[in-house]
Image: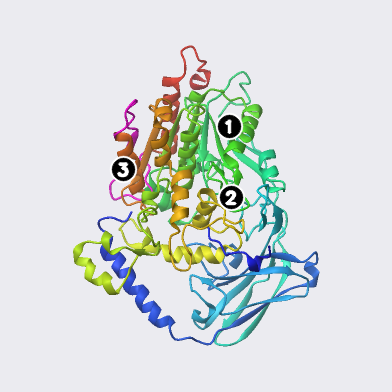
Amino acid sequence: MTPSAARHRVVFCSYRSGLYVATIAFTVLSFFCGIAHSAPRASPVFTIVRSAPAGGQPVTGRLFLMISRTNEPEVRLQSTWFNSPEIVAVNVHELAAGQSQTVDASALGTPLRSLEELPEGDYYVQAVLNVYSQVHRADGHTLWVHLDRGEGQQFNKSPGNLYSEVQKLHIRGAQSYRLTLNRVIPAIQPPLDTQWVKYIRIQSQLLTKFWGKPIYLGAVVLLPNGYAQHPEVRYPVIYYQRGHFNLMPPFDFATHEIEEKAWDRREWQSAGFESGYAFYQSWKSDHFPRMIAVSFLDPTPLGDWSGGVNSVNNGPYGDALMTELIPEIEREFRTIRDSNARMLTGKASGGREALALLLHHPDVFGGVWVFHPWAFTFRHYFTLDIYGEDNAFVVPTANLPEWAHSASNWLPVVRPILRTPDDVPVASFQQLSQHDAVMASMAGGDCLGADDAILGPVGTDGYPQPLWSRKTGKIDPDVAAYWGEHGDLVNYLRAHWSTLGPLLVGKIHLYDGEMDHFYRNQGVHFLEDFLSQTKDPHEPGEFHYGALAADWQPMTNAELVGIMADHIVKNVPAGTDLTWKQQ
């Protein structure tokens, strides 16, 4: 199948009281934006040429045109989500050296939908070609996908991808511009091991068989103080899930102060935890629990994380983590190979992955501490109930208070997905869907499309079947039912409580702010309600909520390690060697 025949895919990354006024404001904005867009304007046209010096075989992939008001950092390295430059993308098939591809107003963009909406002005412009490989998957489907090369599915950093030099252009009207793909992103130098941090990379036999190409898994391992000096000691392990790909050590461990923007510093301070350097000061201090911490690196050909579960789209990632990567970690490092000495924690997407690992493998792990987890129960997929609603872009009239019904009769209320701690919507489902449609092509994308790959069925063309149309927002009820059966963790608990319940007693700990950025607190409350009614055994779990807080953590990372260490000591069998705690 050629890219032109394949469907464009997206992959991204609770509304209740208090949102109605904000969503109606969103509605008005969308209404007037629609009026503004109704008058077509002359549009610039870009010709992107693949230079002969780039050489090599014809390439197939996704071509991105990036337009920014700044070149700091370089345009291609600028964030591509909420503070994105303008990005316009098209598929290319077998583009040979010397050939060109036109990008014009017909190509979908984000955050502006089209080049015709771009205001006249001075811009920095750059093109990047994300190179795909054809794979013959074990399920019989032939796909074009980007195979990760150690960068974690980051198209702007992936070795072998082509890109142009940055040009500063004055863009206006129906003018023509030309960029040349004359550079190649070089191979990534593997990170170097240190006294504290070690890196693992293995080829997964299970995933290689599924994809028909070599597929790799990795891990970042943080060692305790004195590990080399005490070769007789074995240590408990904290499996710290990041979800989306990140080479930073667990807990952002850093042996020196890292220069950061004031905004980044305010974010972690408001969330409640400390800097990576402050954590290091605790980690190496006397009388601090000596434990090993591990983060997984599990990008798939369809996204930058696997969710820690098996998937008909991604393949047996859950099995590969449990039977290949974890055993390799425990062979190479001196771990205590007991479920009571394996802890799980994670935030956001990593929080959902940590929770899924515990629920699917309760006999392997001794507990989980989850913070503002990515949506894991789909009565509350952020502000969307995928089972009871038919459109992801608008809020049904029935969900609004009576005083808002008259407005909704003629003006649909836009569904938000992201907000500030003051409850002001920042982005809608429709906006993120548009972004995802640009970043995706045959496969891949950002967070929303990653969920399609992790949770959904395979489409007739071999690519993930999306839960909703990225163009209209219409939800596919068959896909919603599939998500409910195969990915909804509360549904999974409900269906298997008689066997899971006895293995989960005392193991579940969740934390979220009541003003969670993605409204994820609603799903956390839903899980709490379910657990509060469990019987045989009754296991309510432990839940804490921060009032008027967003991404909230009521303890520092160092304090969290101490809490997990105490949990291990309390639950390991009598007579277990506790040298690691007393070292």
Secondary structure beneath label 3: strand
409 displayed left or right of 355: left
* Of pointers 1 and 3, the one earlier in the residue sequence: 1
Residue toward you, 331 or 78: 331
Q: Residue furthest left?
A: 403
Question: Disc 1 to disc 2, how far (Cα)?
Answer: 34 Å
Question: In x, y percent, where is residue 547?
Answer: 28, 47
Which amino acid, by three-letter code, is at mark 2?
Asn
Question: In x, y percent, where is residue 397?
Answer: 28, 64
Badge 1 local density, few (<14 within 10 Å), some, or many (20+)? Answer: many
Q: Is residue 550 magenta?
A: yes
Q: Which range of residues does the magenta coloring cover?
A: 533-554
Secondary structure beneath label 1: loop
Which amino acid, by three-letter code, is at mark 3?
Tyr
Which amino acid, by three-letter code, is at mark 1?
Leu
* Of pointers 2 and 3, the one earlier in the residue sequence: 2
> Is residue 225 visible from the viewing direction of this image?
yes
Indicate which disc residue 313 carries: 2
Residue of label 1 = 223
